[in-house]
Image (cartoon, helix red, strand yellow):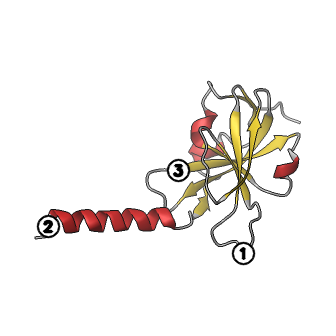
């Protein structure tokens, strides 16, 4: 039988290895639960933080993608912080699920309009929790 101290150490090591690794994702845009959100036009209803993120595997400190959520984060992987104001418009273009994160984590790829200069050429992801009506107002655009 494993002692409490050894068990605690093993749990700590398991959690630390998950936290220290780079998140991996798979596209889930085709899943019914997420497909309904693809193509939505949305508008922020609250101030929201957008963070430039560099991947741990990046050889240089460049922005690899943009993460949009509150309260946000800080650390060596953050390359910039920009506060998006209420009224900022975005369109949901894809959905992805983290395959090695603790818990269920879904991010939606969005296109911001107009595109902030810091975002140019970088994918931007909004955490699924931010698709709530108290943070974001969304509607389906009329057919073209």
Q: Secondary structure at mark 3?
A: loop
Q: Is residue 41 above or below residue 23?
A: above
Q: Secondary structure at mark 1?
A: loop
Disc 2 packing (10 Å; few <14; some 14–19; many ≥20): few
Pointer 3 or 1: first along the chain:
1
Pointer 3 with pointer 1, Cβ within 8 A: no
Nearest-to-viewer mark from 3 and 2: 2
Q: Position of residue 126 (x, y in %)?
A: 66, 44
Q: Which mark is residue 3?
A: 2
Q: Position of residue 56 (x, y in %)?
A: 63, 68
Pointer 3 or 2: first along the chain:
2
| Residue 38 sits in quarter | top right
Q: Which mark is residue 59?
A: 1
18 sits left or right of 95 in the view: left
The quadrant in which the C terminus is found is top right
Whole-number angstrom distance, CA of label 2 to CA of label 1: 42 Å
Kindly identify the residue that appears in the image at 10 percent across and 70 percent down. Answer: 1
Q: Is residue 123 above or below residue 142?
A: below
56 sits left or right of 40 in the view: left
Whole-number angstrom distance, CA of label 3 to CA of label 1: 26 Å
Pointer 3 with pointer 2, Cβ within 8 A: no
Disc 1 packing (10 Å; few <14; some 14–19; many ≥20): few
- Front residue (pair 16, 135): 16
- Front residue (pair 46, 9): 9
Disc 3 packing (10 Å; few <14; some 14–19; many ≥20): some
| Residue 64 sits in quarter | bottom right
Kindly identify the residue that appears in the image at 56 percent across and 63 percent down. Answer: 23
Q: Is residue 122 above or below residue 140?
A: below
Q: Which mark is residue 105?
A: 3
91 sits left or right of 5 in the view: right
Whole-number angstrom distance, CA of label 3 to CA of label 2: 33 Å
């Amino acid at each position: 039988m494993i002692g409490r101290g050894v068990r605690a150490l093993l749990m700590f090591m398991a959690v630390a290895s998950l936290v220290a690794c780079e998140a991996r994702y798979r596209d889930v845009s085709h899943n019914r639960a997420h497909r309904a959100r693809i193509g939505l036009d949305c508008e922020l209803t609250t101030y929201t933080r957008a963070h430039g993120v560099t991947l741990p595997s990046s050889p240089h400190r460049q922005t690899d993608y943009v993460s949009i959520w509150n309260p946000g984060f800080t650390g060596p992987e953050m390359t910039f912080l920009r506060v998006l104001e209420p009224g900022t418009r975005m369109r949901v273009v894809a959905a992805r699920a983290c395959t090695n994160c603790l818990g269920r984590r879904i991010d939606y790829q969005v296109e911001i309009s107009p595109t902030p200069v810091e975002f140019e050429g970088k994918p931007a992801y909004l955490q699924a929790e931010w698709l709530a009506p108290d943070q974001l107002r969304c509607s389906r655009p009329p057919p073209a």
